Image (cartoon, helix red, strand yellow):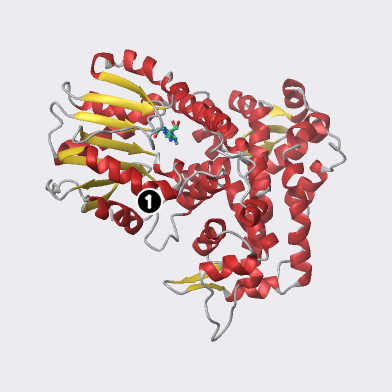
Amino acid sequence: MSESNFVQQLNFLARDASNESAALQAAFSLGLLGQLPSGPGAQPVSLDALAQRLGSNVRGVRSVIEPLVALGFVTLETGRGYLLAEATAAFLSDDAFTARLREVRAWWHAVALLPRAVRTGAPVEGREVLGWYRSLFLAPQPPCPNAEAEDFFDRYARNFARTQALVTAAELGVLERLVAGATSTEALANAVDAKPEGLGVLLGVLARMGIAREDAGNWSFTEAAARMLDATSLPYFQRALPATMAYWEAFGHLDEAVREHTFRLDLRDPETARRIYQENASRISGIFASHLRLSRKAAELAASLRSLSGAKVLDVGTGSGVWGAAFGLADPTTHVTYLDSPHVLSSVRPHLTKLKLEGRSRLWEGDCLSVDYGEAEYDVILLPQIIPALPPEALPGFFAKLARALRPRGLLLISGYLLTDRRDGPLDALYFALRRYVSNEGDVLSMPEFRALLTPVGLTSARGFEMPIQQVVVAHRGDVAWADAAAPAA
Ligand SMILES: C[S@@+](CC[C@H](N)C(=O)[O-])C[C@H]1O[C@@H](n2cnc3c(N)ncnc32)[C@H](O)[C@@H]1O
């Protein structure tokens, strides 16, 4: 595996892999796959019809089926609906294979007991967690009906177990020890306060994941892992893992959410939103400097389209303030308003002080859906990663208010994930969207979906731009020229 592939794979395991397992498991347990026709002459099923057949809500079914389309297990005929890919139909008709799939369903919550199992080397709460890991990763595997079944099973059964192995290795301090150098299982077990028989299983799984290797009785990082994870980068990498675990319980009940529209992690509950958004703002605060390099690219893009001299900028759902600050730094005469809820805004102030931006800043406590933005107040309005946090039904009114608040030649900048026009990728954006669904937040949109919201409120000109990591959609009333230098992505 090349270095960049390894980095991608490790980031995938830290964040999206368990979401992928959850989507496949929910599709299986809801009977979604069984409702899709397959073979010559089969007629596609529309999303509405599928949701009706499953007695489930449309948004939930769509969130689960979209990654399956991106992975090729389900086929989407644009404008018509979904079909089961023939290879998928073939392996789902194999009883021994579907029995294995059913058996895995019992392990979602038990897998979260892995840290305790590694520490004690024994069953936890009556579950043989270590035995299950051994059978899944370290023992000979029963044959699968076809290559697609092999791939499906790996994503369905092993990906969430891989994420949990990584989380456990971080939580117990195993990764930190491996950064320090090679060590025997016994010495490592001693250092991290675990039983050698438990740690042995974990190290064996990390070896299968290409992270650790054993040489003459000593364990160390593989070369690829050592290149990516050193004493400086490991804390950054590990910081993402608690966020993954915050969704674990909810993903174990994804099928229930889709069927019953009930959410174990509900960000429309004010207390939960407070906790999760505060954690998010403090996590971004921890990587503020590197994040600022990204948001400054967006400020450069805006400056290439129009002058920012004296510009009044509004950053909606500011979080750590990293987007607004980039516009504060872009020109010494800009003035930036940072809008978020009060408990989140407390993370913003220290950054503004450090960047000497306080004199040109205003902190605005409020709910972005109900505050009055006024008329022709701002030259630039930023919506960084906020659209997926808002209820989709609130978006038309929200965009109408923002459009009214934009001055002539004003720019609206929306940053975050952008789906393909068919909503069949990119995969990481679909998993991000699935996390938004399972926590009862908003949605990730495609360019046509953005245009459908922007055009009716007068923002008739919109383009997507590729930025490092994510995209930015820029919209205006057609009164700003698109600079040639700013090459559009979509
Ligand atoms: C995913 S975070 C994005 C933070 C930041 N813009 C960034 O890109 O790093 C979403 C932010 O929107 C805020 N938010 C969500 N709903 C909001 C609302 N109704 N009014 C104001 N802020 C809201 C949250 O508090 C959170 O800080």
Look at the numbered disc 1 and give the secondary structure of its residue.
loop
Q: Name which residue type carries label 1.
A: Leu
The 10 Å Cα crowd at callout 1, few under 14, some 14 to 19, many 20 or more, is many
Instruction: Name the one closer to the observer, 485 or 302.
Output: 302
In this rendering, does residue 80 appear at all? yes
Instruction: Name the one closer to the observer, 401 or 288.
Output: 401
- Left or right placement of residue 273 versus residue 92 in this view: left
- Left or right placement of residue 38 versus residue 480 in this view: right
Q: How many dots with numbers? A: 1
Q: Whole-percent x and y of residue 420?
A: 38, 58
Outermost residue, bottom direction? Answer: 41
**Which residue corresponds to the image point at 29% horizontal and 45% vertical from the top-left?**
400
Q: Quadrant of residue 218?
A: top right
Q: Which residue is mark 1?
A: 418
- The quadrant of the picture showing ligand 1 is top left
**Which residue corresponds to the image point at 37% horizontal and 30% vertical from the top-left?**
318
Q: Whole-percent x and y of residue 110?
A: 77, 42
Q: Whole-percent x and y of residue 411?
A: 21, 41
- Left or right placement of residue 89 versus residue 303 in this view: right
Instruction: Name the one closer to the observer, 3 or 19.
Output: 19
Instruction: Name the one closer to the observer, 304 or 164.
Output: 304
Vertical order, 45 against 22 (above or below) = below
The quadrant in which the C terminus is found is bottom left
**Which residue corresponds to the image point at 65% horizontal and 42% vertical from the top-left?**
264
Q: Whole-percent x and y of residue 462?
A: 24, 51
Vertical order, 457 against 306 (above or below) = below
- Left or right placement of residue 189 versus residue 50 in this view: right
Vertical order, 400 against 346 (above or below) = below
Q: Quadrant of residue 39?
A: bottom right
In this rendering, does residue 32 appear at all? no
